[in-house]
Image (cartoon, rainbow, N blue to C red):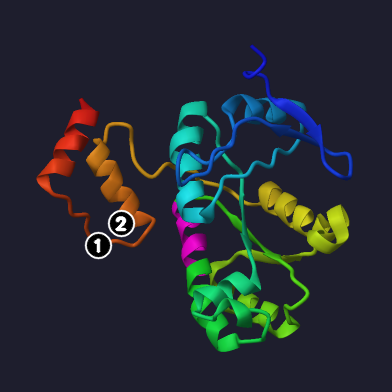
Amino acid sequence: KHAIKPNLVQTLENNPALIHGGPFANIAHGCNSILATKLSMWLSEYTVTEAGFGADLGAEKFFDIKCRKAGIRPNAVVIVATVRALKLHGNVPLKDLTKPNVEALDKGVENLKKHIENIHRFGLPVVVAINHFTSDTPEEIQFIKDKCAYLSVKIVTANHWAEGGAGAEELAHAVVDVVENTKTDFSLLYPDTCTLWQKVGIICREIYGATDVLADKKLRDKFHQLQE
């Protein structure tokens, strides 16, 4: 009988947080309960919730499933990126990720740009938080900012791993500034009237960049069965 109630916990710096559900997006919808989110919105001026992982998988499900059902309209999105992950996307081996490599970073930034474009597809502004590691160089961080400049997004270096809440203050101010001064035009990716197969096609094309979706008769029959 208590499972329906969100859990109120404290962070290490005594800030309130509501923990309730939160399955990963690769096996479910990837976000916490509607009850916890609405409770937080009722109690606080700003609510920050995680929709993970990825601004493709997690964010899309958060918007098209949770926001649709809950009637929630987000004001802004924070995309968390790391220099190391972007270099990994640029085909750098794990053992070399701490070494400066702007050429690999150039390739990896394309992935970040796609995530930003995905969020813009929903009509929402983006703040990019570069989760800072000690191996990051100022040149690499500036390179990311320069490459994404044309997308009109705020990019902030976040040092919360080393400095706690103080290291995320610049990020918090950036988010508040975007929320208070940016007009949003939030829209879902597809209407409820679409069939399951149509929804899959729209998601694959709009979010993942596919040109088409192919399936054999057995799979299409399964979709038809689920639709019925």
Q: Which mark is residue 211?
A: 1
Q: Characterize the magenta stretch by its predominant secondary structure.
A: helix
Task: Name the amino acid type tagged 2.
Answer: Arg
Q: Residue furthest left?
A: 217
Q: Which mark is residue 205?
A: 2
* Badge 1 or badge 2: first in the primary sequence: 2
49 and 1: which is toward the camera: 1
Taking 128 as reference, is 46 left or right?
right
207 horizontally vs 39: left or right:
left
The residue depicted at 50 percent of the width and 34 percent of the height is 66
| Magenta highlight on residue 133 | no
- Name the residue located 73 percent from the left edge and 82 percent from the top edge: 137
In this picture, which residue range is highlighted in magenta? 113-121
Discs 1, 2 touching: Cβ within 8 Å: yes
Q: Measuring from the top left, give residue 19's x and y in whole percent.
A: 69, 33
Q: Residues within 10 Å of mark 1 (few under 14, many from 20)?
A: few
Q: Looking at the rendered structure, which numbered label has been put on residue 196?
A: none
| Residue at 58%, 41% in the rendered image | 74
Snapshot quadrant of residue 16: top right
Q: Amino acid at mark 1?
A: Thr
Element type at mark 2: helix
